[in-house]
Image (cartoon, grey):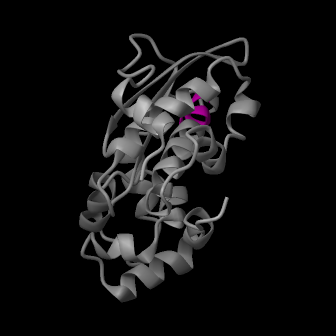
Amino acid sequence: MYSKKLLEHFNNPRNAGELEEYDAVGEVGNPLCGDIMNIYIKVRDGRIADISFKTMGCAAAIATSSMITEMARGKTLEEAEKITRGDVAEALDGLPSVKMHCSNLAAAGLRKAIENFRKGRKRVSREETINEFLTIPGLTEEIANRLWDAGLNSIEELRRTLPSEMKLLKLSDELIEKIKKEVGDDSYKENEIDM
């Protein structure tokens, strides 16, 4: 099921733990499987000088987090944000199709850290995200908090989240449809099996 390389990164993860001094963190999650990833970056002269991760998840989630840190270290921000989920999966000698969302999370976490760095902030705050979610018609503060608690911390993540994943948060079909209509729906792109 898992490649030798993936198992090596799971059993001996590289760059695990929170950096003592970091410039930004990308926090991402998946409500379907419960994976939560934090990718920490330190940037010097436009390059990722140091990078680490903290991940709560399965073997594939830990291995993809480890691999993306190896792939991004030393790259310019522009080069690093071009790393795709397919690149991560390929570097691990493949992932089972049901685990491709893990490589998507790793790439999304890196992009979120870069975005936060460019915006001059370490991380996205709960209050900022809740306020952003509340701009969606029909979304209550209670539901916005539920989305945050599930690890979704941006409109972009809502756009990438499958309707079936949103159902796990006990959202009605009608509300899910309203959310997808308002923010757009890229979930089919992010969850395609072929790379």
User: Which residue range is magenta in the image?
Assistant: 113-117
* Residue 123 in sight here: no
Percent position (x, y) of residue 44?
A: 66, 11
Say whether residue 35 is left or right of residue 178.
left
Q: Is residue 57 above or below residue 77?
A: below
**140 relative position to 136: left or right:** left
The C terminus: image quadrant: bottom right
x%, y% of residue 128?
A: 42, 46
Q: Which one is in front, 193 or 74?
A: 193
Q: Is residue 115 magenta?
A: yes
- Which residue shows up at 59% across the image and 42% down it? 88
User: Residue at image x 59%, y 28%?
Assistant: 117
Residue at figure coordinates x 47%, y 37% from the top left? 4
Q: From what the image shows, is residue 120 above or below residue 164?
A: above
Left or right: 53 as drawn, with respect to 51 = left
Viewer-proximal residue among 190 and 98: 98
Location of residue 19 by image quarter? top left
Does the rendering let one see residue 8? yes
Q: Is 155 or 7 nearer to us in this picture?
A: 7
> In the drawing, does residue 52 fall left or right of residue 34?
right
Please tell me whether residue 47 is drawn above or below residue 72 in the rendered image.
above
In this rendered view, identify the residue nearer to me: 75 or 58. Answer: 58
| Residue 46 position by quadrant | top right
| x and y percentages locating residue 107 in the rendered image | 57, 43
Residue 76 counted in the magenta span: no
The image quadrant that residue 163 belongs to is bottom left
Identify the residue at horizontal 44%, vertical 63% (top origin). 98
